[in-house]
Amino acid sequence: MPAKSQTISKKVNQIHKELKSLTRRFEASHNALKRGNQNLNRGLQGLKKRQQGFEKRQQRFEKRQQGFEKKLEHLIERQNEYENDFKAFWEKMLALHNQEARKAEQDRLKSQKVIDQIYTIADRITKYFDDFNVEKLALGARDDRIENRVESLEESDLKQNHTIEKLDTRLTYLEARQPD
């Protein structure tokens, strides 16, 4: 029996060795799983922190976006106000320009009427002198008529130049008030 007990003892020792080896391998695997689980937990916590950071950034972004939208609404309101103000200003300037143009046309028509009256008077005087005076007097009347025409044209020219200066001054004033 001793030989048998030696073989049994060898087998038991072998089984013990295998059991120790399996236990060590199992403990190593178990420790590796623990470390892996801890690493996963740390990674998961890191991901949760990153997600919280992303959520905070998203909230800040949405808050900023709302602020920008409010500013945009305010800017659109101001733009509409400025457009309405400019439209009213433009209509006022257009009305003023039309009024000045009508005045200038009236002045021109008055000047033309005065010139026509002067020509009519000059023609009557010329006809009178032509009918009642001799050729010498007729020549003198013609000279007078020419001088009168020149004077009336000079007067008319002065009036028109004065009117043009007024219009130029007004136009310069309007251009200076016009926004760029």
Image (cartoon, grey):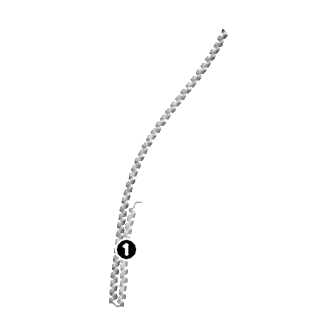
Front in this rendered view, residue 79 or 167: 79
The amino acid pointed to by label 1 is Gln
Asked where in the image residue 5 lies, by quadrant, the reply is: top right
Kindly identify which residue carries mark 1: 160
Q: Could you say whether the residue bearing mark 1 is in a helix, strand or loop? A: helix
**Quadrant into which the C terminus falls:** bottom left
Number of callouts in the render?
1
Question: Residue 24 at x, y = what percent?
Answer: 59, 22
Question: In the image, is 89 to the left or to the right of 12?
Answer: left
For the N terminus, the quadrant is top right
Image point (66%, 11%), residue name: 4
Residue 62 higher or lower than 4, as above or below = below
Give the vertical position of 77 relative to 117 (above or below): above
Task: State the residue lying farthest toward the right.
Answer: 3
Instruction: Give the image location of residue 178, x and y in percent.
Output: 39, 61
Q: Is residue 143 above or below residue 40?
A: below
- Horizontal and vertical percent for residue 34? 54, 26
Q: Quadrant of residue 125?
A: bottom left
- Residue 141: x and y in percent read 35, 86
Please, which residue is most extreme toward the top here?
A: 1
> Mark 1, residues whose alpha carbon is within 10 Å: few (<14), some, or many (≥20)?
some
The residue at 37%/75% (across/down) is 158
- Residue at 35%, 88% (x, y): give it: 138
